[in-house]
Amino acid sequence: MFYELASSSWGAEEKNAMQRVIDSGMFTMSKNVAEFEKRFAEQFGAKHAVMVSSGSAANLVSLAALFYKKEKPLQRGDEVIVPAISWSTTYYPLQQYGMKLKFIDVEKDTLNIDTNMLEKALTKKTRMVVAVSILGNPCALDSIREFCDAHDLYMFEDNCESMGATLHGKYTGTYGDLGTHSCFFSHHISTMEGGVIITDHTEVSDLCRSLRAHGWTRGLPEESKIFERREDDFEEAYRFIVPGFNARPLELSGAIGIEQLKKLDGMINIRRNNADIFRKLFETDDRFIIQRENGKSSWFAFTLIIRPDLSISRSSVFKALKENGIGYRMITGGNFLRHDVIKHFDYQCIGDMQHANLAHDHGFFVGNHPRDLSVELAKLHEVLTCCLK
């Protein structure tokens, strides 16, 4: 394909790291995962980082932790405010833990949650807001943090698409009570599969560590306050304290992550250079709505929404892209309310979802990569100009 949605960011360093793990014979979570967690926390200025098997698992494990906190735990039936556009596993843990979702629309230009709707979604049962920075673009995290503090709500930050982005010089993923990240193949760093939870709350971190590994006590810090250690080492070796999962990462993923993290800043700079090219080509083109940068995006991808007043079929655009070897896909998961799975949710819509529907019906994205895309982006512009005449 001429212009794919994603490509590998690995080099010899990652392959050598894998070989070292293979030679060691230790494949389950061990010292490489621990070292990656340490470096990840340092990179983003967090007290704690917990690696898990995927970004989706990061959402599941970290939400579960909020249900087992000693003070102010979440409970089934609590309400949570969410944006209409995100990936499916932003929402699934909320449903699986019995929360009621209050959907609000996104902004047309940023594609992020419309904070003007937060007050309208607020009730006495509201306990949390999920803040999602879509495709590298920071949402209004400062406003959401202020809203949550004013109403004593948890702020859950799904940062799986936006590693390395900043708002007011502060990393996305660090505004919330916790932040989740993904290290999937197409994301800003890739550990094959993998995810990371960051938080400054020690209790939440310890709960996440227990929950990712069967809900047991093994591997928790000696000073952990989420349980009282007993003297019987035999029983302590297999002591279960919370209903957990097996969401442990592989040692291979930890070793790869160490090498990828060294490259992160450089890879994001290249992505931003590509974004400069993309914007020069499309930001004055009134046939499209492109994503307005808020703060400093890490540019996961490039979104294009065909203006609905143009008598142009999106399918004809897709046909032209496909014929020219240009990959494309739905903007994140589109409007989640439009998917069949919504029938399994307890939810309410606050206002209409005009902008989420616009993105769902008229939008798509093309990929960004940590390499120069000037040739690919020029071709994209040429193809779209031709088919939209």
Image: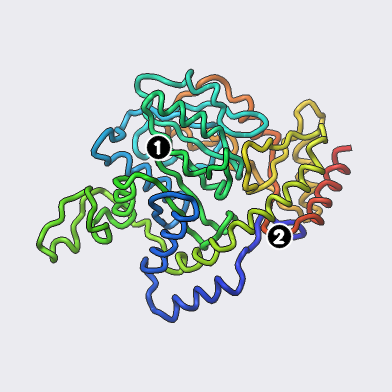
Residue 121 position within the rendered picture, expressed as x and y whole percent measured from the top left? 46, 21
Indicate the amino acid at tag 1. Answer: Leu
Q: Quarter of the image holding residue 166? A: top right
Indicate the amino acid at tag 2. Answer: Arg
Residue 380 position within the rendered picture, expressed as x and y whole percent measured from the top left? 80, 49
Disc 2 is placed on an element classified as: loop
210 displayed left or right of 137: left
Nearest to N terminus: mark 2 or mark 1: 1
Residue at image coords 55%, 60%: 190
Q: Is residue 125 above or below residue 361?
A: above
Residue that label 2 marks: 371
Instruction: Pick the residue in front: 285 or 84.
Output: 285
From mark 2 to mark 1, how far is it between C-alphas? 36 Å
307 displayed left or right of 333: right
Residue at image coords 53%, 76%: 16
Q: Residue furthest left?
A: 231
Residue that label 1 marks: 94
Q: Quadrant of the C terminus?
A: top right
Q: Can residue 167 be seen in this snapshot? A: no
Q: Quarter of the image holding residue 140? A: top right
96 displayed left or right of 173: left
Mark in front: 2 vs 1: 2
Residue at image coords 33%, 28%: 77
33 displayed left or right of 381: left
